Image (cartoon, grey):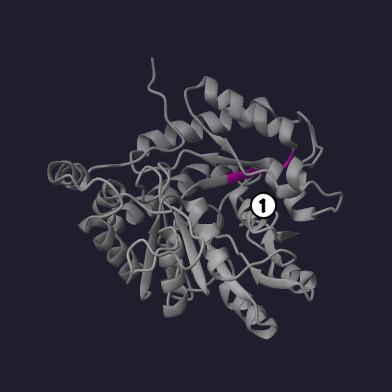
Amino acid sequence: MTNRIPVAEPTLSGNERKYVLDCLDTNWISSNGKYIGMFEKSFADFCGVKHAIACNNGTTSLHLALVALGLAPGDEVIIPTVTYIATANCVRYCHATPVLVDVEPGTLNIDPAAIEAAITPKTRGIIPVHLYGHPAKMDLIRSIAEKHKLFVLEDAAEAHGATHGGKRVGSLGTVASFSFFGNKIVTTGEGGMLTTDDDALADKMRLLRGQGMDPKRRYWFPVIGYNYRMTNIQAAIGLGQMEQIDEKLSKRRTIGTWYNNELAHLSEEIELPYEETGSRHSYWMYNIFLKTGSEQRRDMVMKIMDQAGIETRPVFYPMHVMPPYAETTQYPVADSWACRGINLPTHEGLTESCIKRIANHLNQAIRQTSGLDTNFTARAA
């Protein structure tokens, strides 16, 4: 039987095991230990920022940043409707309102023009999401934020190493949040990181991360905080991952090139990912979009791929069709693009022969589903 190709899997081929065993041998397994500081420094240096604050997952890092930024009930934060649900949820955790806006074709990143139109007297900030590894248009977004005195929280959960204007994501806003879930470019199993150049904000996030305990007075808590700390074991894995980050990013670029070459002949059937001028994609996921058909056809293509031993994933459903955030407002780009998007396998374990096999079965699935339907809507059953 042909081996199954997963859509994502971690690559733990460096010093991860060695560093974890060191944690076990020295009994430093909890939220103290040398690897936390080493991982934070490595990640800060990589992003080109002064501070990196490790957290226990990407969602808590987003929440921690919003609390430290002072988000309060009644405030509004502008986010793209196409994102992983944690982006919206963390705004709600603060009893604030996520204001959804449409995205741009191709990248499905937040549309800067839509941001400007959504600003009200209650708007406190913007959360651009670097979706699937392609950076948002941060120069335009920063300009809007500066004009209206808003914070910019980069949701860089999926974009380790991506660049815009020659600078890495994580250094392009007020603060940035990363995820190290098991399918991410850098993983610690679960884990997150915040990056910033703002000294006062960094100090506040560190304080809140550790239950709000005064760093100069043990067991004295001047504020209500959270237990959002990363363990030394997680950080040990993360440090081992960071030692290989250049190779990881290079391999993903190669995978993107292989896909582009193998799928070029399907240009009349599918949209391939592309890089906007001045940006560099990190290819957390290689996405394709069917040019015709709806969610029904997309799901059938994925089912045929699955039967051939190839795992895929749908592009995220827009927030405005999710029950907690349901709206009757139309978001034309999100509605027409998201329901036709497919994540193809993207991880460092793939070979060129794997890509050829995936491309071959994708071609067959597209042919088999040709003409299935023509209804473009994310609301389809």
* Residue depicted at x 53% and y 34%: 312
Residue farthest toward the right in the current orientation of the protein: 328
Q: Nearer the viewer, residue 245 or 223?
A: 223
Report the quarter where the C terminus lies.
top right
Which quadrant of the view contains residue 317? top right
Which quadrant of the view contains residue 365? top right
Residue farthest toward the bottom in the current orientation of the protein: 147
212 above or below 319? below
Q: Nearer the viewer, residue 68 or 375?
A: 68
Give the residue pinned by disc 1: 82
* Residue depicted at x 18% and y 48%: 19
24 above or below 302? below
* Residue depicted at x 63% and y 54%: 93
Residue 343 placed where, x, y %?
55, 41
User: Mark 1 belongs to which amino acid?
Assistant: Val
Residue 215 placed where, x, y %?
34, 69
Confirm whether residue 226 shows in the render: yes
Q: How many marks?
A: 1
Q: Nearer the viewer, residue 351 or 338?
A: 338
Residue farthest toward the top in the current orientation of the protein: 1
Which quadrant of the view contains residue 80? bottom right
Q: What predominant SS class does the magenta segment belong to?
A: strand
* Residue depicted at x 61% and y 57%: 107
Q: Which residues are magenta?
A: 288-292
Name the secondary structure under disc 1.
loop
Report the quarter where the N terminus lies.
top left
206 above or below 141? above
